[in-house]
């Protein structure tokens, strides 16, 4: 079985492939945007490991939350490879990938920049490569996030977290990418069903409902 998984929810492109019991991975972080870099990087990666898109049995894709443009590019790329051969795609929550790739166990908050003054945040307990959701990914204001981080003892990973006293940390292991794709194989969908995890309400809607002061 040949499995290809990728995540484009962060400024870094993560690629992973599994074949005959072996794992292969590659990542790119640079000044070029995903729209420019993903296709040639993926082409180089597949040629290096000697695999053609038609050889791939199962695809996995990180669905976010994260930058919507990057997510759409990653999803469109996977659809472009899977659809001609009607191959299944497994949607994988990107926050789960980041938590499982973090080297320590404990309570972990994944924080990603959203619009100005707001963040995506999900909180998880991780132990022995298993995770439990404490707080589903949602949009939270900088003020509310700061208060929650101060109240609870937990690791904080993600980006834009320097203002809370943490160093940005956005890593996804190739083996985790493949492992979660295989573990969630029963959740596979057809190429026309895949879509990003888009959780951000408009700021206007949040104000209208009185969720913001």
Image (cartoon, rainbow, N blue to C red):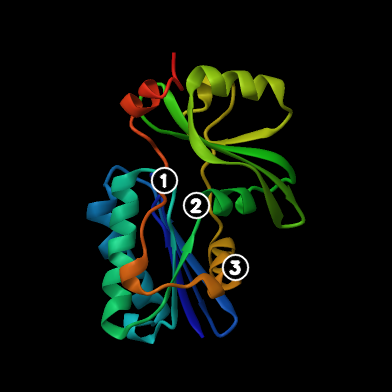
Q: Are marks 3 and 2 in contact (CB under 8 Å)?
A: no
Q: Which of the 4 image quadrants contains residue 208? A: top left
According to the picture, the residue beneath numbered tag 2 turns out to be 94
Side (left or right) of 186 relative to 208: right
- Looking at this view, name the residue that lies furthest to the left: 36
The secondary structure type at the circle numbered 3 is helix
Q: Residue furthest top?
A: 213
x and y, in percent, of residue 69 in the image: 28, 47
Residue at the farthest front position: 209
Rendered view: 72 above or below 55: above
Q: Quadrant of residue 129?
A: bottom right
Q: CA distance from mark 1 to mark 2?
A: 9 Å
- Mark 2: which secondary structure? helix
What is the crowding at mark 2: few (fewer than 14 residues within 10 Å), some, or many (at least 20)? many
Q: Residue shown at 49%/21% (left/top)? A: 142
Q: Are marks 1 and 2 in contact (CB under 8 Å)?
A: yes
Question: Image point 51% across, 43% down: which residue?
Answer: 170
Residue 115 percent location from the top left of the image? 36, 29
Residue at the disc numbered 1: 10
Element at label 1:
loop
Q: Quadrant of the C terminus?
A: top left
Label of residue 179 in the image? 3
Marking on residue 48: none
């Amino acid at each position: 079985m040949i499995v290809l998984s990728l995540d484009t929810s962060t400024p870094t492109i993560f690629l992973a492939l599994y074949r005959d019991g072996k794992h292969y991975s590659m990542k790119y972080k640079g000044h070029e945007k995903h729209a420019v870099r993903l296709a040639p990087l993926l082409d180089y990666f597949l040629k290096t490991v000697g695999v053609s898109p038609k050889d791939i049995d199962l695809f996995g894709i990180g669905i976010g939350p994260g930058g919507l443009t990057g997510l759409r590019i990653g999803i469109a790329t996977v659809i472009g490879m899977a659809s001609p051969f009607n191959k299944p795609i497994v949607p994988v929550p990107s926050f789960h990938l980041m938590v499982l790739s973090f080297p320590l166990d404990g309570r972990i908050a994944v924080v990603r920049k959203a619009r100005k003054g707001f963040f995506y945040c999900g909180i998880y307990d991780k132990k022995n490569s298993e995770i439990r959701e404490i707080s589903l990914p949602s949009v939270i204001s900088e003020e509310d996030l700061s208060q929650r981080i101060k109240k609870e003892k937990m690791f904080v990973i993600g980006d834009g977290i320097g203002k809370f006293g943490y160093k940005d940390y956005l890593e996804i292991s190739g083996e985790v990418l493949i492992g979660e794709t295989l573990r969630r194989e029963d959740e596979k969908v057809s190429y026309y069903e895949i879509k990003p995890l888009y959780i951000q309400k408009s700021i206007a809607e949040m104000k209208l409902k009185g969720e913001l002061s």
